Amino acid sequence: LRSAMKADPAAFQVLQRLGDNLLQREKFAEAADILSQAALLGPDDYAVQLAAARALFKAEKFNLAADFSKRAVQLNPAKAEPLLLAAQIARQGGKTGEAIEFL
């Protein structure tokens, strides 16, 4: 997949759009898979990191969701949305102390 991305950078955008569409249609497991792939291919893309975290949270894959939400926070610490999502993920995963740190 990485070699395909190098050959065709537009493929990253296709993955992102497909994942976003699946997320909007509440197909959380599929969206989580697609957006996770996109997030791994675009580690410095704030929007895809946040979308992957959202999809993984909805798919109840809290450990992976936490990783992507933390990356989104690193990329844009001034934004409230990834901080709130990171707190929700931590709380849902039973990490109340960590959830409070994000708030």
Image: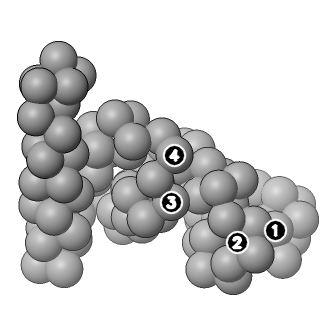
Q: What element carries label 2?
A: helix
**Residue 26 in view in this figure:** no
Residue behind mark 2: 83
Q: What element carries label 1?
A: helix
Image position of 28 with respect to 33: above or below: below
Identified at 46% across, 53% down, the residue is 45
C-alpha separation, residue under disc 1 versus residue under disc 4:
21 Å
C-alpha separation, residue under disc 2 versus residue under disc 4:
17 Å
Mark 1 near mark 2, Cβ–Cβ under 8 Å? Answer: yes
C-alpha separation, residue under disc 2 versus residue under disc 3:
13 Å
Q: Residue 46 carries which label?
A: 3
| Residue farthest to the top, as pictured | 3
Residue behind mark 4: 44
Amino acid at circle 2: Leu
Residue behind mark 1: 102
Picture coordinates of residue 17, whole percent (x, y): 16, 64
Q: Which of marks 2 and 4 is nearer the N terminus?
A: 4
Mark 2 near mark 3, Cβ–Cβ under 8 Å? Answer: no
Amino acid at circle 3: Tyr
Tag in front: 3 or 1: 3
Picture coordinates of residue 20, whole percent (x, y): 21, 69
Q: Which of marks 2 and 3 is nearer the N terminus?
A: 3
Mark 2, residues whose alpha carbon is within 10 Å: few (<14), some, or many (≥20)?
A: many
